[in-house]
Image (tube, rainbow, N blue to C red):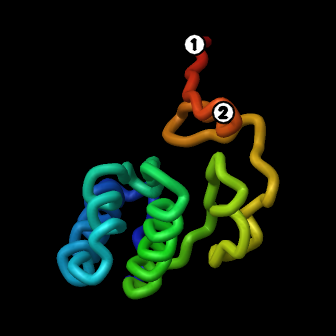
Amino acid sequence: MSRVVYGTTCAPYLAQRVLKQLVMDDGHNYPLSASAVSSDMYMDDLLTCAADIYSAKQLKEQLIALFRGGGMQWHKWSSNCKELLANSEVSDGDVSLTIPNETKALGLLWRPQKDSSIFGVC
């Protein structure tokens, strides 16, 4: 099997183990992305930040390269900075060049324009 089948008992472990191995194998070539994947990733969501636009662009390029090296491709990308959304190398056209009012990540709602996270209680 060459894919992690979600819904199986071992899927969460396998997904995290693949990311750990990717960082161990190629992380030395991409230090920014290795740090982000090691500390800011939960399952298939990466929530991270950068101090400035230059660092954010470097992080984005390194993340794309690191995952490409492992045979994986980004499917979604979101940011509160239009410069990071332009020329995205992600598949399926899941990138909008406009900043949305809200987007979901890890069960939280993120408001990119205000750079704030909220959660609802039912």
- SS under mark 2: strand
- Residue at the top extreme? 122
Image quarter of the N terminus: bottom left
Dot 2 or dot 1: first in sequence order is 2
Residue 79 place in picture, x, y as percent: 62, 51
- The answer to whether residue 19 is left or right of residue 91 is left
Q: Can you tell which quarter of the image residue 102 is in?
A: top right
Residue 10 place in picture, x, y as percent: 29, 59
Label 2 is placed on what type of residue?
Answer: Arg
* Nearer to the camera, 84 or 47: 84
Where 23 falls versus 50 (above or below)?
A: below
Q: Tell me, for residue 95, which label it has, or none.
A: none
Q: Which residue is mark 1?
A: 121
Label 1 is placed on what type of residue?
Answer: Val
Q: Can you tell which quarter of the image residue 12 is in?
A: bottom left
Image quarter of the C terminus: top right
Q: Which residue is mark 2?
A: 111
Q: Which residue shows up at 62% across the image and 60% down it?
A: 77
Q: Is residue 10 visible?
A: no
- The answer to whether residue 75 is left or right of residue 6 is right
Q: Can you tell which quarter of the image residue 63 is in?
A: bottom left
